[in-house]
Image (spheres, rainbow, N blue to C red):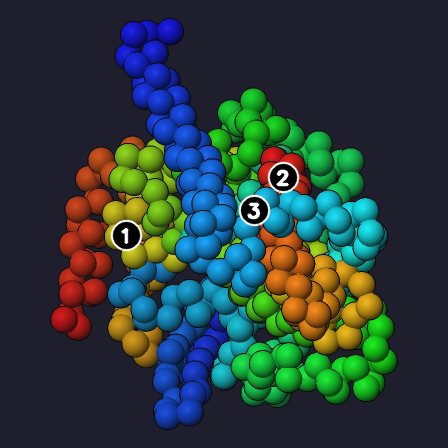
């Protein structure tokens, strides 16, 4: 498989007046084409910092981040924030508008995604008229509109209630697989990470280091909801749970 | 329509009638009481005037003193200062929001300027701008600018941080964020600040007219005081109450239209 992203010995230190805080310590891992990798760890351990560094919104202190070629990243944030004064479709086109890539072809692609994922009738609505789950899917389309090679997801479902969370993560997973995007997701929900990913990276508490990387083996790969019923699910859950509980 | 719904509407209407009734009752009661107290000289009619004397004075002002011209002068000054104030507040708020370091540098000076009673600058303004309309507008600007800048700036600061982050994930430039997020997102705040601004502007204009003017409602009040014609002073105040009420209503109406 083709290696898309390679992170080597990444370190991040924050400075303020009183002290310096080590946020990330010596993290190295790779991401391969078509792969879905999840990163789990205690809250506040620096997972989001890691994503911010990958997407160039924060700087690294030491180490390297290498992309295999000129890859496009799509960043899907925790909140499905939308501009309340714009129609849903225009919100989905926002990334294209800012990047000045709002070509007819790209607009068609976004409309196609709306239709494909059951949102066609909501295109001309205002964001507040949509449910949390729908908004999350629109946020995904907004990110996919830029045709990213790697999708970066920062706790994308954490603001949804449990029921919609299962449903939406299932939908989002299917969309990501269909559009053949590689994904790197940060979450604190172990079950979500195990059911959705090919690999799970477990991070320690601050400063965050890699504790373990698990390649998730299943009897049969299915959708995240099906994967929760897999024989090995409880096994991985237990392993990762112990990894995380170790520090407390 | 269900019976309950009708009940609800009835209750709603009744409450509205009660409110309007008492509003009118208070106004009429006040005017009647004033008139009676003044007529029987329980309060000094020379100082406190009376509604009937005020009406006569206003009629007299209209016939002999070109009242319309005075009202128009005040309105004209208010309008100019208001539009200038809003525009400048908007521009300055953007500059302060966009250039954080500049903001930190000028912060103590703005605080000083804000706490300074602006009327103290009056004499200085007259010397610099001359005893004319320009001084009055400068005075009004001094008063409405700070409030305008603060409310618009706070609007900018209250924008959802997640939205700013979202724009950054698209590598948006600062200009993009300003034009596509900051300004449209604060549209409501800016519109709401108009109401506060119009009252502040009127205060500034009247203060300016007290200092330099040759016409306007403020001038009538000052002139009335100088010739010890308190009926004229009272009439000026009443006219001012009416003008500020009407202006406020107009702005509220515009606000409603714009926010629809």
Helix, strand or loop for disc 3: helix
Check residue A189 in the rendering and tell me which mark sits there, or answer none.
1
Counting from the top left corner in percent of width and height, residue A224 is at: 33, 38
To which residue does mark 2 refer? B253
Q: Judge whether A48 appears above or below B115 on screen.
A: above
Closer to the N terminus: mark 2 or mark 3?
3
Residues packed near mark 1 inside 10 Å, few (<14), some (14 to 19) or many (20 plus): some
Outermost residue to the bottom: A18
Left or right for A67, reference A98:
left
Viewer-side residue, A75 vs A215: A75
Image spot of residue B46 (x, y percent): 56, 61
Same chain, labels 3 and 1: no
Q: Residue at x 30, y 14 (%)?
A: B7
Based on the displayed image, in which of its 4 quarters is residue A200 positioned? bottom left
Q: Nearer the viewer, mark 2 or mark 3?
A: 3
Of residues A152 and A156, the one nearer the viewer is: A156
Q: Which residue, given by chain and number where applicable, does mark 3 sit on?
A: B51
Q: Please tell me which residue is depicted at 67% across the width and 46% down the height of the picture.
A: B56
Location of residue A125 by image quarter? top right
Local secondary structure at mark 2: helix
Q: Are marks 2 and 1 in contact (CB under 8 Å)?
A: no
Residue B144, percent from left and from top: 65, 67
């Amino acid at each position: 498989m083709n290696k898309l992203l390679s992170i080597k010995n990444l370190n991040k230190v924050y400075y303020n007046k009183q002290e310096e805080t080590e946020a990330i310590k010596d993290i190295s891992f790779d991401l391969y084409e078509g792969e879905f990798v999840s990163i789990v760890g205690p809250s506040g351990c620096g997972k989001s910092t890691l994503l911010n560094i990958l997407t160039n919104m924060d700087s690294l202190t030491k180490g390297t981040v290498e992309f295999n070629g000129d890859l496009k990243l799509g960043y899907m944030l925790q909140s499905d924030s939308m501009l309340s004064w714009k129609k849903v479709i225009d919100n989905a086109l926002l990334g294209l508008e800012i990047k000045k890539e709002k070509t007819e072809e790209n607009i068609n692609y976004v409309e196609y995604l709306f239709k494909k994922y059951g949102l066609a009738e909501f295109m001309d609505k205002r964001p507040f008229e949509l449910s949390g789950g729908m908004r999350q899917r629109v946020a995904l389309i907004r990110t996919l509109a830029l045709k990213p090679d790697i999708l970066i997801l920062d706790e994308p479902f954490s603001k949804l209630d449990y029921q919609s969370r299962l449903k939406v993560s299932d939908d989002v997973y299917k969309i990501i697989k269909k559009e053949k995007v590689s994904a790197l997701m940060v979450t604190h929900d172990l079950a979500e990470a195990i059911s959705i990913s090919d690999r799970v990276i477990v991070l320690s508490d601050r400063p965050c280091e890699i504790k373990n990387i698990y390649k998730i083996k299943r009897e049969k790969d299915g959708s995240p909801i099906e994967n929760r019923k897999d024989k090995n699910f409880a096994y991985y859950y237990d392993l990762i749970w112990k990894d995380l509980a170790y520090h407390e | 329509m269900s019976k309950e719904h009708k009940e609800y509407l009835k209750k709603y209407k009744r409450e509205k009638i009660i409110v309007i009734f008492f509003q009118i009752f208070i106004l009429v009661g006040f005017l009647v009481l004033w008139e009676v107290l003044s007529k029987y000289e329980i309060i000094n009619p020379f100082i406190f005037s009376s509604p009937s004397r005020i009406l006569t004075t206003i009629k007299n002002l209209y016939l002999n003193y070109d009242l319309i011209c005075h009202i128009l002068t005040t309105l004209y000054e208010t309008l100019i200062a208001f539009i200038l104030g809003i525009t400048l507040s908007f521009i300055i708020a953007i500059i302060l929001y966009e250039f954080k370091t500049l903001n930190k540098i000028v912060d103590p000076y703005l605080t000083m300027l804000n706490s300074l009673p602006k009327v103290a600058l009056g004499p200085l303004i007259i010397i610099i701008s001359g005893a004319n309309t320009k001084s009055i507008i400068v005075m009004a600007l001094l008063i409405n600018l700070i409030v305008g800048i603060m409310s618009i700036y706070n609007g900018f600061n209250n924008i959802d941080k997640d939205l700013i982050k979202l724009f950054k994930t698209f590598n948006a430039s600062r200009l993009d964020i300003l034009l596509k997020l900051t300004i449209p997102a604060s549209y409501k705040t800016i519109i709401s600040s108009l109401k506060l601004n119009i009252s502040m502007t009127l205060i500034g204009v009247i203060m300016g007219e007290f200092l330099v003017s040759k016409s306007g409602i403020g001038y009538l009040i000052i002139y009335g005081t100088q010739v010890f014609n308190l009926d004229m002073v009272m009439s000026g105040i009443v006219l001012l109450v009416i003008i500020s009420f009407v202006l406020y209503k107009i702005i509220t109406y515009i606000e409603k239209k714009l926010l629809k």
